[in-house]
Image (tube, rainbow, N blue to C red):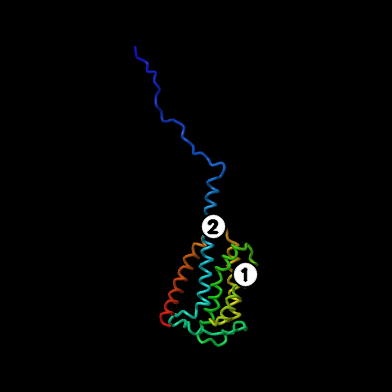
Amino acid sequence: MHAVYSGTTATNNQPKQVPMSDPSGTTGRRKRAERERSLRLDVVLVGLMTALMVLLMTWGKPFMEIPGFMEGRSHFTRNLDLEFFNGFDHPTRWWAPWTNTLGNIAMFFPVGIAGYYLTHSRWATVLLAALYSVIIEAGQYLFVVGFSDVDDLACNTLGAAIGAVMVSMLNRKHQQSLMNVLVPALGAALMFLFGALILGLVTA
């Protein structure tokens, strides 16, 4: 007679645990909030870095020195030019009017980006950028620290308009990608400008 074993036999057919879902979407909302916070911080950083860069490249230019490219002391002058793009007529260096034009557009490109986040309006951003440029040009004239040129006003405003239109067409992911490029680019530009400023002060 065989003994009957009545104990339970262990099996591997136990039901698998299914991860609990997040019906309230708390995790997703938290991640979106973190991304928004990171984007806002980057925008503030871009705005501050851009404001400093613009001041260095305008009011600070007379104190800078870039050998073979720019002699800062020549910008200790008061000059008002109200004729559009006459710098292309007889330039002392063929590339000078191009660097001035494209440089002014590029300089205000991040102004348009930061301004759009502030106003959420393309037109308001363009108007604020134009006003900012007028203040810069007027300051150069009043403080005798550069050439006040209507070309600069036009190119600055155009650069801000390009920045505002571009960022308004991007989704949040691509806006963050743009910030990831702008922050180090502006940092490198500021390092270069501070180097030129130090060189200008040392050789003055």
The residue at 59%/82% (across/down) is 85
Locate residue 166, reporting x and y percent: 58, 65
- Up-down relation of residue 138 to residue 3 (above or below): below
Picture coordinates of residue 2 (x, y %)? 34, 14
Element type where label 1 sits in the image? helix
Helix, strand or loop for disc 2: helix
Q: Earlier in the sequence, mark 2 or mark 1?
A: 1
- x, y percent for residue 182: 50, 65
Residue 30: x and y in percent read: 53, 49
Query: Label 2 sits on what residue type?
Result: Lys
Query: Dot 2 corresponds to which residue?
Result: 173
> Total label count?
2
User: Which residue was labeled with disc 1?
Assistant: 128
Task: Residue lying at the far top in this picture: please name it.
Answer: 1
Quadrant in the picture for the N terminus? top left
The tag on residue 169 is none
Near-viewer residue (201 or 39): 201
